[in-house]
Image: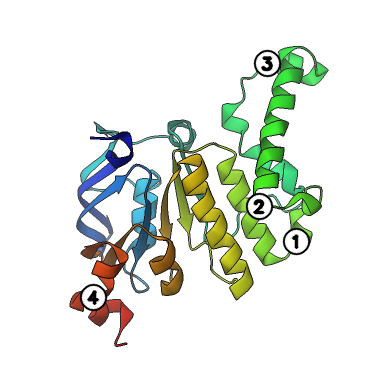
Amino acid sequence: MSEKNKNLMDIEKVNLSFGGLKALIDVDLKIITGEILAIIGPNGAGKSSMLNVISGIYIPQDGLVKWKGKIRKKVAPHDIARMGIARTFQNIALFRGMSALDNILTGRNILMKRNLLLEMLYFGSGKSQEIEHRKKAEEIIDFLEIQSIRKTPVSRLPYGLQKRVELGRALALEPELLLLDEPMAGMNVEEKEDMCRFILDVNEQFGTTIVLIEHDMGVVMDISDRVAVLDYGIKIADGTPDEVRSEQKVIDAYLGAA
């Protein structure tokens, strides 16, 4: 099996409950290296719960989560980052008083080798490390075409650019798996087109595997390699965009009549 067709993550018979509320019920899901996988479904279907299981925030009561074929137990957030998993959030979670550049630099924090004295003195390896990480951050800024706002505090940026900075911070980790929670929410048509282009470029140029939750079905059908559909915590479909949109169960639960 080629590297691109290997499963990066396998989720097997996962059950997740909060008291009497069943968020996920016997869900199987694979994430294939190099793909763009969209998770869709109506509100309350369990999409965010699934993303939180993938990212290690939630630990299911039953079932297995395998990362590169090995069972993953409870993992601390910083260890999830070290594994190469990064995410953006439905509600923007940036440091609003910091510039776009500094926000992106925070995404490289886990990659820095600490020597507090050399960093304070800005000397030797402390200096060279700082230069290297700033170079990487500037490359991301160029990639996302946000050079003009690199020194601007993010609190002064319009919503669409804040979402782009948040994507940049996630990319700064150099992730193998990038999780995007409603990356197009609240955007106008032009901003959505730009974000779609960046997501496709991240996947094609960096080889990053992407899992996204998105309500815009035009976006989902255009950029996804595969679509998984949840309804009341149950996976009701999983296949190519064309296969999924022709499934009667999906039409009834979510897409509706043409």
**Where is residue 22 drawn, in percent x and y?**
25, 63
The amino acid pointed to by label 2 is Val
Q: 139 or 92, which is in the foreground?
A: 139
Q: Which of marks 4 and 2 precedes in the sequence?
A: 2
Residue 31 vs 162, above or below: the answer is above
- The secondary element bearing badge 2 is classed as helix
| Residue 179 in picture, x, y percent from top left | 45, 50
The crowd level at tag 1 (other Cα within 10 Å; few <14, some 14-19, many 20+) is: some
Hey, which quadrant is residue 6 in on the image? Answer: top left
**Residue drawn at (65%, 64%), measured in percent from left and top?**
160
Mark 2 — residue?
165
Residue 246: numbered disc: 4
The local secondary structure at tag 3 comes to loop
Amino acid on which disc 3 is placed:
Asn
Q: What is the count of numbered marks?
A: 4
Q: Secondary structure at mark 1?
A: loop
Q: Nearer the viewer, residue 6 or 21?
A: 6
Q: Residues within 10 Å of mark 3 (few under 14, many from 20)?
A: few
Disc 3/disc 2 C-alpha distance (Å): 28 Å
Q: What residue is rendered at 57% in x and 43% in y?
A: 171
Residue type at numbered disc 1: Leu
Residue placed at 76% from the left, 12% from the top?
Answer: 124
Are the residues flagged by discs 4 and 3 in contact, CB closer than 8 Å?
Answer: no
Amino acid on which the number 4 mark rests in the picture: Ser
Q: Is residue 220 visible?
A: yes
> How many residues crowd mark 4 within 10 Å: few (<14), some (14–19), many (20+)?
few
Residue 140: x %, y % from top left: 65, 43
Labelled pair 1, 2 in contact (Cβ < 8 Å): yes
Residue 234 x/y as whole percent? 22, 64
Mark 3 lies on residue: 115
